[in-house]
Image (cartoon, rainbow, N blue to C red):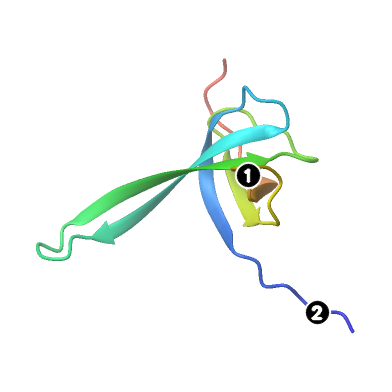
């Protein structure tokens, strides 16, 4: 019996790739203010494991939740959705 796992996924931008096999991904979401209803941007950073794709700074990537890899890593970069336009 094979079960299909419905894993949580997020889309964000790589802001640091200085570690080995790890990148920092910043995920942005827009939420309305509870009283004034103005739309506010909220940011959160995730440490993500890099296995077979190697993203650069500024790339937009898709990350999925996986079992804990280390103390803070619980995400895996699965694909690069858009390459960064800024050349270093």
- Assign the C terminus to one quadrant of the image: top right
**Which of 19 and 29 lies nearest the eye of the viewer?**
19
Q: Which mark is residue 39?
A: none
Secondary structure type for disc 2: loop
Categorize mark 2 by other alpha carbons within 10 Å: few (<14), some (14-19), many (20+): few
Q: Nearer the viewer, mark 2 or mark 1?
A: 1
What is the C-alpha distance between the residues marked 2 and 1? 24 Å
Residue 43 in the image: above or below residue 37? above
Quickly name the residue at label 2: 3
Q: Residue furthest right?
A: 1
Going 51% across and 46% down the picture, which residue do you hit?
A: 12
Quickly name the residue at label 1: 73
Q: Position of residue 59 (x, y in %)?
A: 57, 35
Secondary structure type for disc 1: loop
Query: Where on the picture, by quarter, is residue 47?
Result: top right
Q: Position of residue 28 (x, y in %)?
A: 40, 48
- Assign the N terminus to one quadrant of the image: bottom right
Q: Position of residue 32 (x, y in %)?
A: 23, 62
* Horizontal side of residue 13 vs 64, given as left or right: left
Query: Where on the picture, by quarter, is residue 60?
Result: top right
Going 68% across and 48% down the picture, which residue do you hit?
A: 76
Going 64% across and 56% down the picture, which residue do you hit?
A: 64
> Which of disc 1 and disc 2 is earlier in sequence?
2
Going 57% across and 19% down the picture, which residue do you hit?
A: 87
Q: Residue furthest left?
A: 36
Categorize mark 1 by other alpha carbons within 10 Å: few (<14), some (14-19), many (20+): some
Q: Residue furthest top?
A: 88
């Amino acid at each position: 019996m094979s079960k299909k796992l419905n894993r949580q996924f997020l889309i964000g931008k790589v802001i640091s790739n200085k570690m080995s096999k790890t990148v920092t991904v910043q995920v942005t979401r827009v939420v309305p203010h509870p009283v004034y209803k103005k739309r506010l941007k909220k940011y959160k950073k995730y440490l993500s494991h890099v296995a077979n794709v190697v993203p650069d700074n500024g790339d937009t990537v898709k990350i999925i939740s996986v079992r804990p890899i280390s103390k803070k890593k619980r995400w895996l970069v699965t694909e690069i959705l858009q390459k960064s336009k800024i050349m270093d």
